[in-house]
Image (cartoon, helix red, strand yellow):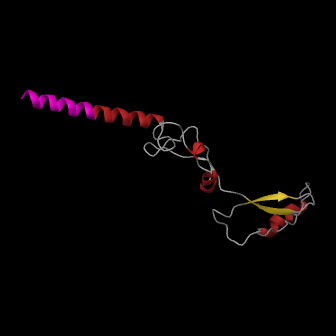
Amino acid sequence: LAQAGLLGLLLSPTPYTLPKMVQRLTYRRQCRYNTKSNKQRTVKTPGGKNVFQSVQKAAKGPKCGDCGKALIGLPALRPMEYRRLKNREKRVSRAYGGSRCAGCVRMRIMRAFLIEEQKCVKQLLAEKL
């Protein structure tokens, strides 16, 4: 069957071209395994050679600690980049800014207020009895 397939290719009216040689690429850094932190992109240089270029990991933005939604107003950077930022760039000017989203902060404030109100009502009922 394999010979019949080759014979069919040779006798077919469309010309069959052999695959071209591919230029082999080597890693340019010390890690030589295809890991998450060692991703590469193939780039053609002006001289016509293909070389590997290291790709940085894509940054995931900061998330709310309560609900897990992305926090608005904060840049999505890698951890080392966050260390280089100023404090005003790392947080939002609000209570729990940079840690919790606005909806969760609102819920926390309402919960604290209602708990205090409940304590006051309980105290009034105890005084009446």
Instruction: Tell me which corner region of the image, top left, top right, bottom left or bottom right, holds residue 4.
Output: bottom right
Q: Position of residue 65 (x, y in %)?
A: 45, 46
Q: Is residue 98 left or right of residue 24?
A: left
Q: Is residue 37 left or right of residue 125?
A: right
Residue 119 within the segment the image draws in magenta? yes
Closer to the camera in the image, 26 or 81: 81
Q: Position of residue 97 (x, y in %)?
A: 50, 40
Q: Position of residue 32 (x, y in %)?
A: 70, 72
Instruction: Tell me which corner region of the image, top left, top right, bottom left or bottom right, holds residue 2.
Output: bottom right
Q: Is residue 54 left or right of residue 81?
A: right
> Considering the image in quadrants, where does the C terminus appear?
top left
Residue under the image location 23 percent in, 32 percent down: 118
User: Is the magenta region chiefly helix, strand or loop?
Assistant: helix
From the viewer's perspective, is residue 98 above or below residue 127?
below
From the viewer's perspective, is residue 27 above or below residue 45?
below
Q: Which residues are magenta?
A: 115-129
Residue 65 within the segment the image draws in magenta? no
Task: Count all numbered tags in the image, as a single digit.
Answer: 0
The residue furthest top is 128
Closer to the camera in the image, 89 or 73: 89
> Considering the image in quadrants, where does the N terminus appear?
bottom right
Residue under the image location 69 percent in, 61 percent down: 39
Q: Position of residue 127 (x, y in %)?
A: 10, 29
Residue under the image location 65 percent in, 56 percent down: 57
